[in-house]
């Protein structure tokens, strides 16, 4: 079975633009979470979605939004990009969205110039 | 969120054991201790977790102190593929969902 897949793998944007990142969970997994990892730091939780509903939100501004589709894939949207949004964005999936182990994708590397 | 403290980095020789310490003095009675690792250019990968008793799996062993204020991840025979950042994380029983609170982790260097 395929693991968690994310697209694109790399992306370059300029300040003020918006970006959409995509994630496909492992087959059978109904929960998707998003994390931001700035260089040299551990990942930080952004959102969790389960059955198309938001289950949790981290301490990120409203410029960050996400949604989950009926096939359980997910999109992360970031508006009005800032230089500080440059980071690796990681998607993780799990079966039920509870306190089970997470399976992470390899991430999308976003550079904002 | 309960906090964990880990050394920034550790070195090991190939084929030797690696003991990665983690302090979590503010752990509550129902917090699980989870370990993830992140290899270069990859997302984090689950390693092991435990509550009170020591745990073993094919990847590693987890030794938990009797007072639960610290734990140690043990890689029995380090290989070059074990070079990664290892994160010790507390999963709070009262917290819903998939939120993991990562710290800075321990960067493990394995020398041939």
Image (tube, grey):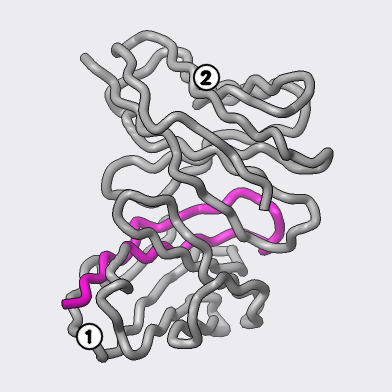
| Tag 1 near tag 2, CB within 8 Å | no
Residue B74 is tagged as 2
Q: Residues within 10 Å of mark 2 (few under 14, many from 20)?
A: some
State the residue at coordinates (33%, 15%): B12
> B108 left or right of B19?
left
> B55 left or right of B38?
right
Q: Is residue A26 visible?
A: no
Judge whether residue A51 is colored magenta: no
Element under label 2?
A: strand
State the residue at coordinates (59%, 64%): A28
Q: Picture coordinates of residue A8 (x, y %)?
A: 26, 72
Q: Is residue B67 visible?
A: yes
State the residue at coordinates (57%, 70%): A58
Relative vertical location of residue B37 with respect to residue A32 in this rendering, above or below:
above
Which numbered mark, 1 or 2, is in the foreground of this view? 1
Residue A15 is tagged as 1
Relative vertical location of residue B60 with respect to residue A85 in this rendering, above or below:
above
Report the Cα–Cα distance between label 1 and label 2. 44 Å
Quarter occupied by the C terminus of chain B:
top left
Q: Quadrant of residue A12?
A: bottom left
Query: In front here: B58 or A34?
Result: A34
Q: Picture coordinates of residue B36 (x, y %)?
A: 50, 40
* Magenta region, residue range: A88-113
State the residue at coordinates (57%, 53%): B101
Q: Residues within 10 Å of mark 1 (few under 14, many from 20)?
A: some
Q: Picture coordinates of residue B42 (x, y %)?
A: 33, 49
Element under label 1?
A: loop
């Amino acid at each position: 079975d395929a693991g968690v897949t994310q697209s694109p793998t790399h992306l370059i944007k300029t300040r003020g633009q918006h970006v959409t990142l995509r994630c496909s969970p492992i087959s059978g997994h109904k929960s998707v979470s998003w994390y931001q990892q700035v260089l040299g730091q551990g990942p930080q939780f952004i959102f969790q979605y389960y059955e198309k509903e938001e289950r949790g939100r981290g301490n990120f501004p409203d410029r960050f939004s996400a949604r989950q589709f009926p096939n359980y894939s997910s999109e992360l949207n970031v508006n009005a990009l800032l230089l500080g949004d440059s980071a690796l964005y990681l998607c993780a999936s799990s079966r039920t969205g509870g306190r089970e182990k997470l399976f992470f994708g390899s991430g999308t590397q976003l550079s904002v110039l | 969120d309960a906090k964990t403290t880990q050394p920034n980095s550790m070195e090991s020789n190939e084929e030797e054991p690696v003991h990665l310490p983690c302090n979590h003095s503010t752990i509550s009675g129902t917090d699980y201790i989870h370990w993830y690792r992140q290899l270069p250019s990859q997302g984090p990968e689950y390693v092991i977790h435990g509550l009170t008793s020591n745990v073993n799996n094919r990847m590693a062993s987890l030794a938990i102190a009797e007072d639960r204020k610290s734990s140690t991840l043990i890689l029995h025979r380090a290989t070059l593929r074990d070079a990664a950042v290892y994160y010790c994380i507390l999963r709070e029983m009262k917290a819903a969902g998939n939120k993991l609170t990562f710290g800075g982790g321990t960067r493990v260097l394995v020398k041939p």
